[in-house]
Amino acid sequence: MPQGQPQKKGFGRLTIIAGIVLVLLIGGIGFGVYHHAQVTDYSALNPKATTKKQIEVKSGSSAQVIATELKDKGVIRSDKAFVHYVDTKNVAELKAGYYLLSPSMTIKELTSKLTQGGSSYPLNGEGTVTVREGENADAIATEVANKTKFSKKEFLAALNDSAFLGRLKDAYPGLLDDAINATDVRYKLEGYLYPATYDVKDATNVREIINQMVANDYTQFSPYFDQIKQSGMNVQQVMTLASLIEREGVSQENRNIIAGVFLNRIKVNMPLASDVAVKYALNTDKANLSNKDVKVDSPYNLYANAGYGPGPFDSPTVSSVKAVLNPQDQDKGYLFFVANLKTGEIYYSKTYDEQLKNTDNVQADNDAVGSASSSSK
């Protein structure tokens, strides 16, 4: 018996070790099974959910960043499963924008939505007012009237309120000096209401909303004041050209070239001949203008009047101001351009004869776009 005691102790230690190994093995298997379920369960978090949550996907966001946002907002069960799905299914690019997504959606449905591209603006719209790129004061006033307790009439009246304008001028030095002194303008603050979404739920009067927009405009454009001075133009002139370019060009390259065309025209005292300006004068958004339209008696008619015009025609973005300050191909002597409204392509020319040929080439497409636009109203 004495000789067997050590054997029992050794056996006991082996039993304990074996038990520990077994527990670890079972635990490891269990964790592995759990982890696999976490990363491969693509089902909806709550198939019966009826609510939707707004998610903003910022430009350049990785799948992991998007997954974390979706999990934090209670849209998905597992960020790991989302990333795993994107990786293993070779999901196409997840595009930036605002989305309304529901916990009732599977990961497959969510990624399908996210590859289509979201809205450029918040979608719930509660307590917010959105100024869109190239939108004019009348359209902004309509948005304010629809989203707040303030009327369109009082919003527009505030844009020309001299006492209010004076306070804004003092608050944002260098921005509004030329605008306030401008003559023949429809609204003194046209062009100075920066495109963005604004929180207005706590606004007690319409001036507080306008102040937000002008403050943002100052933030965006004050870094360019020195460059504007060096350009030989004043702020009002730059903003006016930028407001035309905002609507005339889509890509940054086209905006830069169009800026060069406009500056070449001003240099030789040619009217800018912008359809955007005539449409503003007529308060119309129709695609094609008639010969009668371009003869309208208005200081905003830049077919009939040379120079910059009274002031901005809409709310331009920084990219359009940059185009004015950094024109492209100005040395090529372009004086004309025409856009194909169907394809978006823009054709530039030095002479009127070349312009006529380019216009003939796009006329059929532009007429078709015009007809479609008219029939949809």
Image (tube, helix red, strand yellow):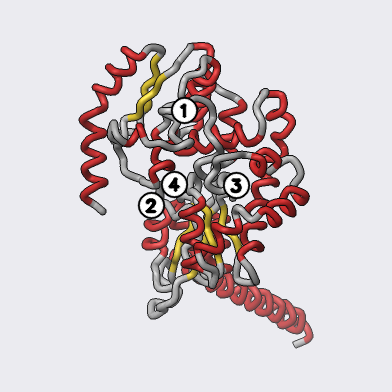
Look at 53% across and 70% down and name the residue there. Answer: 148
* Label 4 or label 3, whichever comes before in sequence order: 4
Closest to the camera, between mark 2 and mark 4, is 2
Q: Position of residue 27 (x, y in %)?
A: 58, 74
Residue 54 visible in image: no
In screen coordinates, is 354 left or right of 365?
A: right
Mark 2 and mark 4: span between their CA atoms? Answer: 9 Å
Q: Which residue, given by chain and number where applicable, does mark 3 sit on? A: 188
Q: Return the residue at label 2.
A: 116
Name the mark on residue 305.
1
Q: Residues within 10 Å of mark 2 (few under 14, many from 20)?
A: few
Task: Let me know if residue 23 appears in the view.
Answer: yes
Q: Is residue 36 left or right of residue 213?
A: left
Instruction: Look at label 2 and name its amino acid.
Output: Gln
- For the residues labelled 1 and 3, say whether their Cβ atoms are less than 8 Å apart: no
**Residue at the spot x=37%, y=36% of the render?**
296
Mark 4, residue position: 93
- The answer to which image quadrant residue 359 occupies is top left
Q: Amino acid at mark 1?
A: Asn
